[in-house]
Image (cartoon, rainbow, N blue to C red):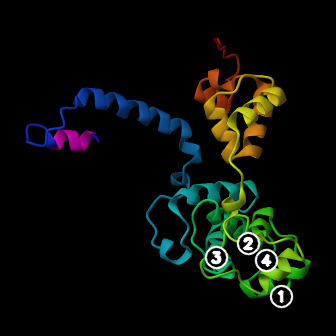
Amino acid sequence: MGAIVASLQGSELDTGLNLDDISKYSAYWESARRLYGPFECAVTMKSGNADVYKHEIPGGQYTNLQFQAFSLGLGNQFNDVKRMYREANLALGDIIKVTPSSKVVGDLAQFMVQNNLTRETLVERADDLSFPASVVGYMQGNIGQPPYGFPEPLRTKVLRGKPKAKGRMGEDIPPMDFEKVRKQLEEKHGRPMKDQDLMSHAMYPAVFDQFERFRQQYGPVDKLPTRVFLTGLDIAEELDVS
């Protein structure tokens, strides 16, 4: 933004924004990025790579997938995970990859690497495999109907008689009574609920409950500085929390 503001100063398109104020934001985000640097793909990815045209991993998912791979002990096989992402996508029917469908592809890709599967052996052994929950939910139609239909016989082998959703999932959902939900959440978690809490619960109920349990166990960790929250205090370091 600063570059745009500076380049337009004195012209008929002058933004009127103060460059000094923008520089303060730049300094803030520079320090923030240092704190979150360990979670960036730039830790291991030092250059651009055209293989996105092959694997089609969405940019926002790339870092998450890499972090998950390291968590699963597949860090040194991340190139295999990327290659298998393409195979998993094709096995699922070459679907549109956006949250949450992209996660389904990523989960299946890592599952295939862990179990040394190819696209062909995935289908052959599907009757005996324990698939990730996201893949089963996708095959049930829980996140919608893919434009080209579900892949067979993989779908039948994955579901093994589980129910299938028809049409768009939201079509038959009754309107949400927010005040009723607010009361239920306040009784469940023992605190007043803001509108933001209701929205979080409506979109991600399981994640919201997990977050509430985390807060109840560890307290208001949002009061901690980011560095302390992520890495902990140094030996003999003290911290006042207010």
**Residue contact between numbered discs 1 and 2, judged by CB atoms under 8 Å:** no
Q: Is residue 79 above or below residue 154?
A: above
| Residue at 69 percent of width and 66 percent of height | 104
Q: Nearer the viewer, residue 172 or 91?
A: 172
> Residue 170, image x and y in percent?
67, 59
Q: Nearer the viewer, residue 227 or 135?
A: 135
Residue type at mark 2?
Lys
C-alpha distance separating marks 1 and 2: 27 Å
Mark found first going from the N terminus, 4 or 1: 4
Q: For the residue labelled by badge 1, is the local secondary structure a helix, a strand or a loop? A: helix
Q: Return the residue at label 1.
A: 124
Q: Return the residue at label 3.
A: 89
Mark found first going from the N terminus, 4 or 2: 4
Q: Return the residue at label 2.
A: 166
Residue type at mark 1?
Glu
Q: For the residue labelled by badge 2, is the local secondary structure a helix, a strand or a loop? A: loop
Q: Residues within 10 Å of mark 4 (few under 14, many from 20)?
A: few
Q: For the residue labelled by badge 4, is the local secondary structure a helix, a strand or a loop? A: loop
Q: Is label 1 or label 2 in front?
A: 2
